[in-house]
Image: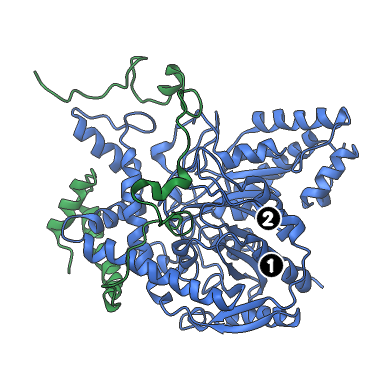
Chain colours: A blue, B green
Amino acid sequence: MPVTIKMRASTIDAIRHAITERQTTATALARDFYTRIRKEDPAIGAFLTLCEDRALAQAARIDALAAAGKPLPPLAGVPVAIKDVMVTNGVRTTAGSKILDNFVPPYDCTAVARLEAAGAVILGKLNCDEFAMGSSTENSAYYPVHNPRDKSRVPGGSSGGSAAAVAAEMAVATLGSDTGGSIRQPASFCGVIGLKPTYGRVSRYGLIAFASSLDHIGPFAKTVKEVALVLRTIAGRDPMDSTSAEAPVPDYVAELEKPVKGLRVGVAKEYFGAGLDPEVRAAVEDAIQKLAELGCDVVPVSLPHTEYAIPAYYIVATAEASANLARYDGVRYGFRAKANTLSEMYRLTRDRGFGMEVKRRIMLGTYALSAGYYDAYYLKAQKVRTLLTRDFDEAFKKVDVIAAPTCPTPAFKLDEKVDDPLAMYLADIYTVTANLAGIPGISLPCGENHEKLPIGLQLFARHFDEATLLRVAHAYERASHT
Amino acid sequence: MKVSDKDVAYVADLANLELTGEERARMLRDLNSILEYVARLAELETDKVPPMAQVSDRYDVDESRRGSNRFAYAIREDIEHGLRPSLPHDVAVKNAPDTNGTFFEVPKVIER
């Protein structure tokens, strides 16, 4: 049965409907996506591993349900792909690192298992910065990802493969992880939608840990409704992750249609300061104007500690990373360097297995936690984290959502920032705050600059209020397409 | 506070990293540049501000309780065999670089 280009770019509901009505099959759809990946991905580099056997087995299960006239699950036959920091049973999982080059996990990440249980077809594993440490996907130990909108530019990071795969229509939806902006920033650079949920909203069981108090799993897709459908599927308490919250999961899709009139949208001047590209500023200000035209009340708010977010973040994140990455010792899994003594084996394994940015962050984190520096760096950063969170608590007494740019600039060129770690860290200046405070954040397209590069609008909401976040995003999306 | 060559060597040792001479020089430069930027945290008065280690501390902790009972939200009944069966032995060692099938093997630690 022929599958048209239109079908490929189609939505989750359209795919389910087409399979139910026997206009296509999940198997034909999966094969069509693999054909497209083989044609397009060599110039993009979004995928690290394809899992065709697993995908086609799942597609066959969906097709058998459809053939028997049984009701199909909500994501039936939807081709999805997973950032390679989420473990997949029997499918190689590298975290973008050579130290896990040959690692084949014996279990599935909860978010992945929930997608598959809802009928999604997992096509493969997506490229990313090594251990999700980076803002351009140039720290992948395998190959960089090229931005499908302009292949001389980065797709953002660390979930660059997840954003690029959706932008290039090599998957309908993908999962990424966000520790300091790693979902929202690449979504902005590639012109797609990316959501970082509230801390505790989505189980991290099976997510390879970078910084445990900041790590989140979330979806990418081309429309807000797709993002809401995927979030509804993966959210909710998981007994395997004690940090996953009991909070009930609303029907995010049904909530999209509620009116936005009268909602209060906060605008903080701290997100519009020096360093913000003028075209990005103009596009985001236009988007806020559009929200006002939709009946939202635009209210100035203050988030006075914003300028301290990057320094606090890089201390907290690297300190946690230095502890989490201690497990890579060459004993139980992954790469092992040949050595004569145990301590030599540890050192050589880690030295050769980790890339430069990972070692840099382990060093910074170890330094910040070491005797004599703990109070000055780590404890200080944790206190500043309290101040940053209080800023949001105060602001959310006055407003329902906060609007801001996702990134200070559109996508930069490959190689532009690789030699300057601090410049690379500053690409996350507007996104790390939501990780430190644990509030949900979304990035959605709000125009292009003069070079046709996408610009992202970022929205924040209160803890566990993804419903309002998605509702405002949906209203803006609809208004900006008419 | 400037990081010295000696600090880099000491921290690399703590982190079980070897680092080449070139990597050490680069690390010295990068750590100093990042820490110089981080130093601005000292501008903030934080004597009376409590540290925040976890977001979940803020919305699920029951402050009326004491000790680990504050984290009752994350406590479940004991299950005799865990939440799921342990991995079978052969699966648990399948990814090991060196194993005799029962144990992970490593270079000799103690000479006798």
User: At x 34% / y 44%, what residue is drawn?
Assistant: A325
Q: What residue type is labelled 2?
A: Val
Pinpoint residue A445: horizontal percent, then vertical percent: 66, 68
Where is mark 1, residue-wise?
A473
The picture places residue A149, in percent across and down from the top left corner, at 64, 62
Task: Give the answer, above or below, for where A357 lies relative to A35.
Answer: below
The residue under the point 55% across, 62% down is A463
**Chain hosting mark 1:** A
Please indicate whether residue A173 sits to the left or right of residue A482 in the image: left
- Residue A400 marker: none
Is A146 on the left or on the right of A377, as rendered? right
Q: Residue furthest top?
A: B101
Label 2 crowd bin: few (<14), some (14–19), many (20+), radius 10 Å = many
Q: Nearer the viewer, residue A435 or A430?
A: A435
- The residue at the point 63 percent across, 47 percent down is A41
From the image, tell me which residue sits under label 2.
A227
In this rendering, the answer to whether B52 lies above or below A47 is below
Q: Is residue A152 visible?
A: no
| Quadrant the C terminus of chain B occupies | top left
